[in-house]
Amino acid sequence: MIKKISLILSLFTISTACLAQNWGGGIDDEDWSFGFNFQYISAEYKILKKENWRAPFYEVPNSLGVSYDPNSGLPVTNSLNAISSPPSQGFGLGFVMNRRLAENFDIRATPSLIFSDRVVSYEYLPLDPIDLGNGQTKNYQTIIDKKVQATMFEFPIGIKVKSNRMNNFRAYWLGGAKYSIDIASKKKFFDEGETPINKLLKNQRNYLSYETGIGFDLYFEYFKMSPEIKVAYSTNDLLQHDDTAFANPIDKLKLRQLTFSLIFQ
């Protein structure tokens, strides 16, 4: 993916450098400018585990809770072998509001709607099936993936530090912070009455992140296009610490997000 993005950026740079200087719609002459963006997103968790994260869980009689006590009931899970978060892809759409501060400095906000699920994968040691009687058998999975479905409204704001314009090309660095809030339906997080093995892994509904990135302003006759790559890291723990076999092994859950954007102004 990174190689493809680098090739695209190289082609844009070569093509714009070969042309006469374009006006760019006069976008750099305005104190305020506006636009829109399309985003490709890759997200994963940084997982901090508790000291006893490998411990198996057992059913609590007359309850949907879990226990570390092997005498409390049948196993819910066996001992954990690994917890990981494979990267998952998403996309976003947003607006761009840009305030020119000086020739080489802007302040920029990009409120966006983001559709990006995340996954935590639990790998357990094998456990033999248990005979429950009456012809019923309880089987155990060795790998369980818990998907956190997220529809986020994000409001990033940051400082854009720009190089001097070279023909139809300008590079820039961006740094700032963003506020995110999950606007997905509460039904996606409702697991009341579910068995312990079917409980959901839940996140906090809002959080803050800091982000940084680089991009390029490419000037055309009537508009400016900016390919951009950003990385963002959540500042606080995203996990809802409820009493489940999937939340209990985790001490903290933080989000890492890579965003490739095409911005049009």
Image: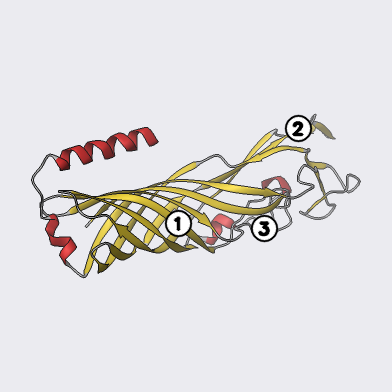
* Disc 2 residue type (three-letter): Leu
Question: Distance of mark 2 from mark 3, alpha carbons?
Answer: 28 Å
Mark 2: few, some, or many residues within 10 Å (few <14, many ≥20)?
some
Foreground disc of the pair 1, 2: 1
Mark 1: few, some, or many residues within 10 Å (few <14, many ≥20)?
many
Q: Earlier in the sequence, mark 2 or mark 3?
A: 2
Task: Tell me: residue 36, above or below residue 6.
Answer: below
* Disc 3 residue type (three-letter): Glu
* Disc 1 residue type (three-letter): Glu
Image check: 108 left or right of 114? left
Q: Position of residue 47 (x, y in %)?
A: 63, 48
Badge 1 is on which residue? Answer: 211
Q: Assess whether mark 1 and mark 3 are in contact (beta carbons under 8 angstroms).
A: no
Q: Nearer the viewer, residue 254 or 140?
A: 254
| Position of the N terminus by quadrant | top left
Q: Nearer the viewer, residue 180 or 131?
A: 180
Disc 3 is placed on an element classified as: loop
Image check: 154 left or right of 133? left
**Residue at image point 32% right, 37% down:** 6
Q: Which mark is residue 125?
A: 2
Badge 3 is on which residue? Answer: 192
Disc 2 is placed on an element classified as: loop
**Residue at image point 88% right, 44% down:** 70
